[in-house]
Image (tube, rainbow, N blue to C red):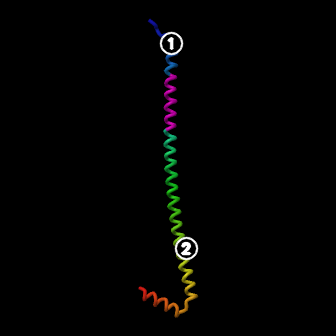
Amino acid sequence: MHRPNATDQLKKAKAEAQVIIEQANKRRSQILDEAKAEAEQERTKIVAQAQAEIDAERKRAREELRKQVAILAVAGAEKIIERSVDEAANSDIVDKLVAEL
């Protein structure tokens, strides 16, 4: 019968410690991989939200610009009409519009 001596016990303890260290390293790698994946998902989500906000703001800005251009065009047309249409022509235009309505 073999009785474990101190050297055998030390070898066994070292082997067990090595297994524990390997398991801890695997778990550490797993945790890091999971954290990286979660961070990448969060980054993708934040970028998508930011792009959606940018697109919405761009759309709002374009719409506002269209409104301003339309207002300026109408104002410009009114000024041109005021200068080029005399009272008789104005009356004639109004009469034609009323007849068409």
Which residue in the structure is indicated by mark 2? 69
Magenta-colored stretch includes residue 31: yes
Q: Mark 1 and mark 2 in contact (Cβ < 8 Å)? A: no
Identify the mark nearer the N-term, 2 or 1: 1
Residue placed at 49% from the left, 27% from the top?
Answer: 23
Which residue in the structure is indicated by mark 1? 8
| Amino acid type at mark 2 | Val
Q: SS of the residue at dot 1? A: helix
User: Where does the image place residue 39, in percent across and percent down from the top left?
Assistant: 51, 44
Residue placed at 50% from the left, 10% from the top?
Answer: 5
Q: SS of the residue at dot 2? A: helix
Magenta-colored stretch includes residue 14: no
Q: Quadrant of the N terminus?
A: top left
Residue placed at 50% from the left, 53% from the top?
Answer: 48
Please tell me whether residue 1 is drawn above or below residue 57 in the rendered image: above
Please tell me whether residue 54 is drawn above or below residue 67 in the rendered image: above
